[in-house]
Image (tube, rainbow, N blue to C red):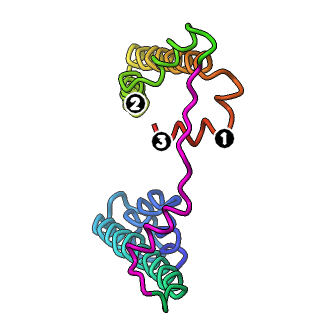
Amino acid sequence: MLTLFTVSTFEGWPSLLYVSIDSHTENFGPIYNYRPLVATYYIIYIIVIAFFMVNIFVGFVIVTFQNEGEQEYKNCDLDKNQRNCIEFALKAKPVRRYIPNDDRIQYKVWWFVTSQLFEYTIFILIMMNTITLSMKFYRQPQPYTEWLDFLNLLFTAVFALEFVFKLAAFRFQVMFSMAYCTLNDRY
């Protein structure tokens, strides 16, 4: 049971798998790859228990909460879509957007930083950075390691430059206020 619990938590199960594959009969030492079929059992157990059963449990909890939430509207004549529309209308807030008007240079930097081209470029650079960070492998050649380190420094410099541009465009007080955070999520 302890082995199955360890496998279902996903913590340290590969080493347990190797020990199980190498296990032999009682009172005998391990033999390398003696029972490779045990790996199939582990994988089936992970798929059935860890994925399906946990997802069924989480789904059951979500459905229960949804049903409890629907109980308050039990005697209401509106359907679910109409209730959602009314809830949205009651909670909606007008959109405010910070636009600098004191300084022309700040306005130009703000225009550049809020442009779709800038946002998409940064998004693509984030994806490329993620890919380069995942390209490391065991016993990689030294020039390859140096190249990945150079790319990491390059991406870090670009993201630092993005921060400087956004700081120049929005200024410190606006950039770190809650209003900017909620507005920036919408654009």
Residue type beneath disc 2: Phe
Q: Regarding mark 3 in the picture, which secondary structure is present there? A: helix
Which portion, as a residue range, is magenta?
Answer: 77-100
Q: Give percent across and percent down for residue 95.
A: 53, 42
Residue 132 appears in view = no
Mark 2 surroundings: few (<14), some (14-19) or many (≥20) residues within 10 A: few
Residue type beneath disc 3: Arg
Among the two numbered marks 1 and 2 on one chain, the one whose residue lies closer to the N terminus: 2
Q: Give percent across and percent down for residue 9.
A: 51, 66
**Rendered residue at 58%/18% (across/down):** 169
Among the two numbered marks 1 and 3 on one chain, the one whose residue lies closer to the N terminus: 1
Outermost right residue:
173
Q: Which residue is mark 2?
A: 123
**Rendered residue at 55%/16% (across/down):** 165
Left/right placement of residue 150 relative to residue 174 reads left
Left/right placement of residue 149 relative to residue 179 reads left
Q: Regarding mark 1 in the picture, which secondary structure is present there? A: helix
Q: Regarding mark 2 in the picture, which secondary structure is present there? A: helix
Q: Which residue is mark 3?
A: 186
**Rendered residue at 38%/20% (across/down):** 141
Q: Give percent across and percent down for residue 156.
A: 52, 20
Query: Residue 119, located in which quarter of the rendered image?
Result: top left
Query: Residue 124, located in which quarter of the rendered image?
Result: top left
The label number, if any, that marks residue 178 in the structure image: 1
**Rendered residue at 38%/73% (across/down):** 81
Outermost bottom residue:
75
Do the CB atoms of the residues marked 1 and 2 lie less than 8 Å apart? no
Q: Give percent across and percent down for residue 46.
A: 38, 69
